[in-house]
Amino acid sequence: MGASSDPNPEASDEQQKRSEIYTYEAPWHIFAMNWSVRRDKKYRLSIASMLEHYPNRVEIVQLDDSNGEIRSDPNLAFEHPYPPTKTIFIPDKECQKPDLLATSADFLRIWRISDDHSRVELKSVLNGNKNSEFCGPLTSFDWNEAEPKRIGTSSIDTTCTIWDIERETVDTQLIAHDKEVYDIAWGGVGVFASVSADGSVRVFDLRDKEHSTIIYESSEPDTPLVRLGWNKQDPRYMATIIMDSAKVVVLDIRFPTLPVVELQRHQASVNAIAWAPHSSCHICTAGDDSQALIWDLSSMGQPVEGGLDPILAYTAGAEIEQLQWSSSQPDWVAIAFSSKLQILRV
C-alpha cells in the first residue's frame, strides 16, 4: 500500500513493523544468499548475482532495525568470477574466528571481511583438481558447524571434496555418485550426505571412505535429486527435492529407501528447503509457485488423511529460488525471488 493512498504515513510504518517483512531490492537477479551467524552481526546476509557474463557481484547487506531498511555496505561489495552457486558465512556464533565468507562457483573461494569492515579480501582459492588448473564446476558446499575448519564441496564431476581451509589442503576427495553431485550437507563432525543426478541420497563417514550408504533412490530411474537438507536438531531426518517436482521427500535414515512423509502442497517445482535451526520438527520449503510454506512434522510417523498441510504460508512476488533460516535468530527466514531479498519473521 503506497503512502499516497494512506492519509497517515506513520500508521503504515507501524503496520510494516508489525508485519515484520523487510525487503531489499538488488541491482540484479539474486541467486545465492545466506545469513551471517555471528552474534555481533544481527540481520546480516550475503547475496550474490546471477548474471550470464563472467563478472558477477556479491553484496553484504544488513537490516537497520531502527528504521526497517536493509542496506548494502558499498565497502563490502565485490566482484566474483561466475555466478556463485552458494555462499555461507563461517559458522562462528561466538565471534572467536576471523569474519569469513565462502563462495562456490568454478572454485571454492574464502573471503575475509576486515576487522574494521572497510573491505573484503580474497583469502584463498581452493581447486580440488590436482591434475589441471581447470575443474568441474561446484554445484554446492556446506561448512561443518562442529569443525569449522572443514568445508565439503559437491561437483558436476561426480566428486565430493572435503577441504581443510586452515591448511588450504584437501582432506579427502571421493567419487560420490555415478553422475553429477548437486548438493552436500554435513550431519556431524565426520559424516556428510550428498544428492545427485543419479537419483540417490548417499551418506558417507570419513572414518570409512570406501563405503557409502544409499538412504533413498528416486522412484523413477534417473530422476535427479537437486537439494538436500539435514535436520541439525534431529540428525535422523533429512529432506530432499526431486528436479522439477512439486513435492519434498522427508527421510528417516534408520529406515532407508522409504520416505517417512512426502510434502505435497506446492503447486509448482520446489527450489529450496530449510530445517528450523531451533526445532527438530519444523521445515520450510519454497518454490516456483511463489510460496514459502512452514510445516510441523511432529506427527510424521502417523498417516494423515489426505496428506500433511503446512501451518504457515507466505506468497512472494515471484518464484522463490532461495530460502535460508537464520540459525542465530531463529525467528527469521530469508527468501530471494527475482531481484528481491525479503526477511520474514516467523
Image (spheres, helix red, strand yellow):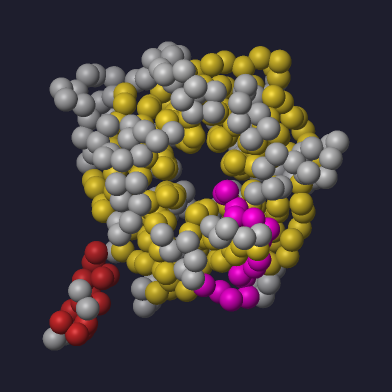
> Does residue 85 appear to the left or right of 5 in the view shown?
right
Along the horizontal axis of the image, is 326 left or right of 186? left
* Residue 80 located within the stretch drawn in magenta: yes
The residue at 30%/56% (across/down) is 316
Residue 241, position as x, y percentages in the image: 42, 33
Look at the image and say whether residue 280 sits in the magenta stretch: no
Q: Residue at x 70, y 54 (%)?
A: 110
Above or below for 181 versus 118: above
Q: Is residue 28 visible?
A: yes
Viewer-nearest residue: 299 or 240: 240
Q: Is residue 98 visible?
A: no
Residue lying at the far front in this picture: please name it.
Answer: 52
Placement of the N terminus among the 4 image quadrants: bottom left
Q: Residue at coordinates 30% horizontally, 31% vertically from top-left? A: 263
Number of residue marks: 0
Q: Nearer the viewer, residue 194 or 18?
A: 194
**Residue 345's quadrant in the figure?**
bottom left
Query: Where residue 106 sits in the image (x, y, percent)?
Result: 69, 48
The reply, left or right, for residue 291 in relation to residue 65 is left
Provide the residue span drawn in magenta.
Answer: 72-86
Residues 159 and 66: in front is: 159
Q: Which residue is painted at 39% across and 57% down in the image?
A: 337
Give how far across and how far down residue 209 sits, in percent.
71, 19
* Side (left or right) of 151 relative to 218: right
Q: Position of residue 43 (x, y in %)?
A: 45, 63
